[in-house]
Image (cartoon, grey):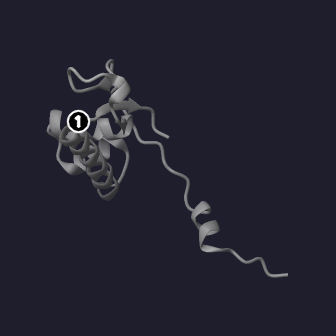
């Protein structure tokens, strides 16, 4: 009998996600607009991986290759991580949402 693999099943077969090097553990893991109760805020979750990419690129002023090397990833993957982080941060700032720093999933 031939085993049929559906498109949905193929997504589960991909490469396992690599662990990136993160040399930063934030002491503060929640940011919210002042004067807005938490009960009424939507929350955007930013991973520690995304925060580390932002820190290296924007705080330490590393170029993309240096950031990728520091995180043990490719420049293309680093760019995807940065794009995700920038989108989440912009969404939170523009729409008045809280930002929660979470461990990578």
Horizontal relation, residue 52 to residue 3: left or right = left
Picture residue at 30% right of the left edge, 22% below the top: 37
Residue 60 seen from this side:
no
Q: Secondary structure at mark 1?
A: loop
Horizontal relation, residue 83 to residue 42: left or right = left
- Residue 81 place in picture, x, y as percent: 32, 49
Q: In this orientation, which residue lies closer to the viewer: 52 or 87?
A: 87
- Residue with the mark numbered 1: 96
Q: In this orientation, which residue lies closer to the viewer: 53 or 64?
A: 53
Note whether 8 is above or below 46 in the view shown: below
Q: In this orientation, which residue lies closer to the viewer: 26 or 23?
A: 26
Picture residue at 57% right of the left edge, 64% below the top: 11
Residue 1 image-quadrant placement? bottom right
Residue 99 image-quadrant placement? top left
**Furthest-right residue in this view:** 1
Q: In this orientation, which residue lies closer to the viewer: 24 or 96?
A: 96
Note whether 51 is above or below 7 in the view shown: above
Note whether 64 is above or below 49 in the view shown: below
Residue 66 image-quadrant placement? top left
């Amino acid at each position: 009998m031939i085993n049929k693999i559906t498109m949905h099943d193929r997504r589960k077969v991909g490469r396992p996600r690599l662990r990136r090097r993160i040399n930063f553990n934030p002491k503060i893991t929640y940011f919210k607009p002042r004067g807005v109760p938490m009960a009424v805020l939507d929350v955007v979750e930013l991973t520690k991986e995304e925060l580390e990419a932002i820190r290296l690129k924007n705080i330490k002023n590393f170029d993309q290759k240096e950031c990728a090397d520091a995180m043990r990833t490719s420049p293309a993957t680093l760019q995807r991580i940065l794009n995700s982080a920038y989108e989440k941060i912009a969404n939170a700032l523009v729409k008045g949402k809280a930002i929660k720093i979470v461990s990578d999933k």
